[in-house]
Image (tube, rainbow, N blue to C red):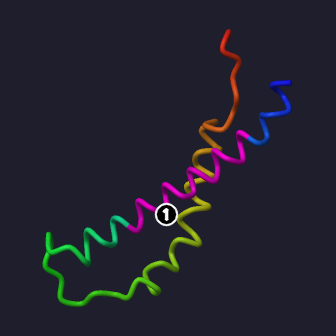
Amino acid sequence: MFKKRIPKFSFITILTDAAVVTGAYCFAYWLRFESEAMPIRDIPGFAEYGKALWVIVPVFLFMFKAHHLYSVRSPLS
């Protein structure tokens, strides 16, 4: 019964990781350009800046997979 839930768990985990990476990227954009913590003269539009997400999210997910963060281990191991 547990083995049937593993693909669903992995899929939900990958979606959650993608959402967290995207949220962190959006927060970094806001902190850098929208908040007044750091004065900036030339502010790129988010549409231009957000194009990098198409590369950043898959790279992060690949790195997570490469470090075996999506492998399910037995609680007894």
* Residue located 86% across and 24% down the image: 1
- Residue at 42%, 65% (x, y): give it: 25
Q: Which residue carries the number 1 mark?
A: 22
Image-based side of 73 in relation to 27, left or right: right
Q: Position of residue 10 (x, y in %)?
A: 71, 42
Is residue 22 magenta-colored? yes
Q: Identify the magenta region.
A: 9-26
- Residue 37's spot in the image, x, y percent? 14, 69
| Image quadrant where residue 38 sits | bottom left
Mark 1 packing: few (<14 Cα in 10 Å), some, or many (20+)? some
Q: Position of residue 30 (x, y in %)?
A: 30, 72
Q: What is the quadrant of residue 68 in the picture? A: top right
What is the three-letter code of the residue carrying label 1? Thr
Answer above or below: position of 55 versus 65.
Answer: below
State left or right for residue 31 relative to residue 46.
left
68 vs 12: above or below: above
- Image-based side of 24 in relation to 11, left or right: left
14 versus 7 height, above or below: below
Give the dominant element type of the magenta stretch: helix, strand or loop.
helix
Secondary structure of residue under mark 1: helix
